[in-house]
Amino acid sequence: MNKNELIDRMRAGTLSRRQFGQILAGAGLAFTTMGVRAARADDQAIYFTWSGYDDPGFFPGYVKKYGANPQLPVFATADEALTKIRGGFQVDVAHPCNLDLKRWREADVLQPIDTSRLANWKDLFPSLTQVAYAQDSGKQYFVPIDWGNTSVLYRPDLVDIKEESWSLLFDDRYKGKLSMSGDAADAVPIAGIVNGAKDPFNMTADELAAAKELLIKQKPLLRFYWDSNTTVEQSLASGEIVASSAWNSSLYTLLDQGVNAKFMMPPKEGIMAYVCGLVVTKDAPHLDKAYDLIDAISSPEAGVWLINYGYGHSNKKALELAGDELLKKRNLPKDPDEFFAKCILQKPMENVDNVLKMFEEVKAGA
Amino acid sequence: MTAIGTAAGATSRGSNALSQLWLRSESLRGLTLISPTLVVMFGMMVAPIIVTIVQSFWTQNGFQFDRTPTLGSYAVMLGQDGVIYWRLIGRSLWMSFTATVAVVALAYPMAYFMAFRVTRHKLLWIILITIPFWTSYLLRVFAWKVILGFNGAINSGLIQAGLIKQPLEFLLYNPTAVTITLAHAWAAYAILPIYVSLEKIDRSLLEAATDLGDGPVKRFLRVTFPLSLPGTIAAILMVFIPTVGDYVTPSLVGGTDGMMIGNSIAMMYGRANNQPLGAVISIVMMLVIAVLVGLFLLAVGRRRLLQKA
């Protein structure tokens, strides 16, 4: 029975009930199998990453190979990501930073990575692959990718400062026009640095109490605690806020839009720096694709894209491919060792539970 | 052979007795009928509450639970460290209360209009009221961010009209913004029950009131309003109870001091890694709401009893 005949017979009302039933069953079967095929298209590696890092430019090789993006759930802070993964959220590859590794390793959610399966592994800077907690008894748990800074991003046309300092974020002349990261891993060390704590990542009880007091004093000055760099960029561009803690890429996003913005490089107390990278979770459902994804993100092409976005990359060849001009434009050295020597490297915090609790208390309005 | 025969007979007699019982007992039939709902209710509402109660007696160290029962988290809640949570509960209750008052004040005239003034296409009106609900809750909150924002609809409108030079900053990122957003987001939950109870009012009662000399205001106060109370009370409860624990609205439009108790419970279960304390705060919050709602119903009920007497 061809299509036209079917329609004619339906119009004429001569279609038997059994025939109609057969047609319905066929349609049902077709829909079901179509659904299966659609579901298969979704069957990509799951890459759990920072909001703002979900652009295909980060993993061109993966898109080429599979013709699709990986699945891209995003998080606002690494602690939030860890909580979700521990709560049973299934992902293949996640994107924490060196300062989170201790906690992630303790939480026992990672599996060792077989570096022989990664074509780009040999080109990565050894100083980055060997950061604290990345390796353990010959096993590798962390593939470094991006390195960058945490500093103050501000509008030089809207603030009046004599020297660049973290204290701008605590300046009551700009009440209601400042913003601060909602992530304790950034915010609490900043308070420590301003207070002159000896080690802002491992503060004594007194130093922690002083940091808390400073953050409480800062709270009424803030418009909001930010959760995503997009929020910071939008409100700096509109002039809703004049200064905020931020990461490198926000500066270039603003400059590209013609906004008069400046990133303190460095503030007088020193600039913070970090390296983030990829880990594979214990029960990764798409392990093979996960390795392809890691290889794609650590490739030189992905590196050039990342450098253009504003961050350093862990692949030596990426820095070569990017060329001196671009590196200079992005204020990046050719060697991350040179970069980290000048910065305060963000480290895993020793008393992290206390620090998190303290900062949540500040936000709750203690 | 005989043994099998007897067994079969017993079975059929047994199932006979069962079906007899089933046919005779009305409550059993009722229970069977609602059993799917009961299963869902138990699985989705009772079980989580039990888990929360059990968890509130544990302690958490980092990612590990210590399952020895202890009142430690309750002690924290009642001690010096618990003050901020009580304060947050108080603030959340106040914010929900203002939102509820705003919602009911706005919803009542709308429901009144629909019940008494609209005579044709009532269904169309009801559908119009629910249109904002066709998008997700999150989108509605974001829409308010766009309206109230620094470069938002209100600010750019006022600037274009030449009324202000600088954008107004008090519109967004404070408790008022939360109240406004909640009031809009929950409007339909208030309009519909009030509408139903107004719609049910027997029009001849209103005519009788007019015949006996009541003016429109008196008629409203003595007949319409008391008869619409069941719907209004339902609306108050339906808006007040869920908004106290709201979490996403304050985190999007609340700014640094628009936080509500829901946010700190979410933090306890998330970043702060203290699920037992989160459970205690949840339980305390449920109890506080239950007591308040109980008092409210008692007050309303007594008034209505007095009216009858």
Image: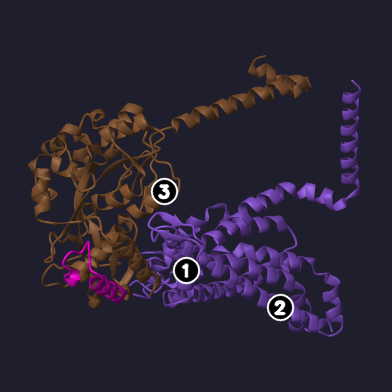
From the viewer's side, name the closer residue of A152 and B74: B74
Instruction: Look at the image and tell me whether residue A198 can be seen.
Output: yes
- For this view, does A352 lie left or right of residue A12? left
Tag 3: amino acid: Arg
The brown-tinted chain is: A
Return the residue found at the far top: A1
- Separation of marks 3 and 2 at Cα, in angstroms: 44 Å
The first of marks 1 and 2 along the sequence is 1
Return the residue found at the far front: B3
Which chain is home to disc 3?
Answer: A
Residue A119 drawn above or below residue A111: above
- Kindly identify which residue carries mark 1: B72
Residue A23: image quadrant is top right
Q: Are marks 3 and 2 on the same chain?
A: no
Question: Would you call the spot at circle 3 few (<14 residues within 10 Å), some (14-19), or many (20 or more)?
Answer: some
- Separation of marks 1 and 3 at Cα, in angstroms: 24 Å
- Where residue B296 appears, as percent x and y from the top left, is 67, 77
Q: Residue at image x 37%, y 57%? A: B62
- Separation of marks 1 and 2 at Cα, in angstroms: 34 Å
Instruction: Look at the image and tell me whether residue A15 can be seen.
Output: no
Is the residue under label 3 in contact with that under label 1 (CB below 8 Å)?
no
Residue A294: image quadrant is top left
Secondary structure, mark 3, is helix
Residues in magenta, as a range: A194-218
Asked if the magenta segment contains residue A308, the reply would be no
Which chain is home to disc 1?
Answer: B
Tag 1: amino acid: Gly
Residue B298 drawn above or below residue A340: below
- Kindly identify which residue carries mark 3: A86
Residue B298, which numbered label?
2
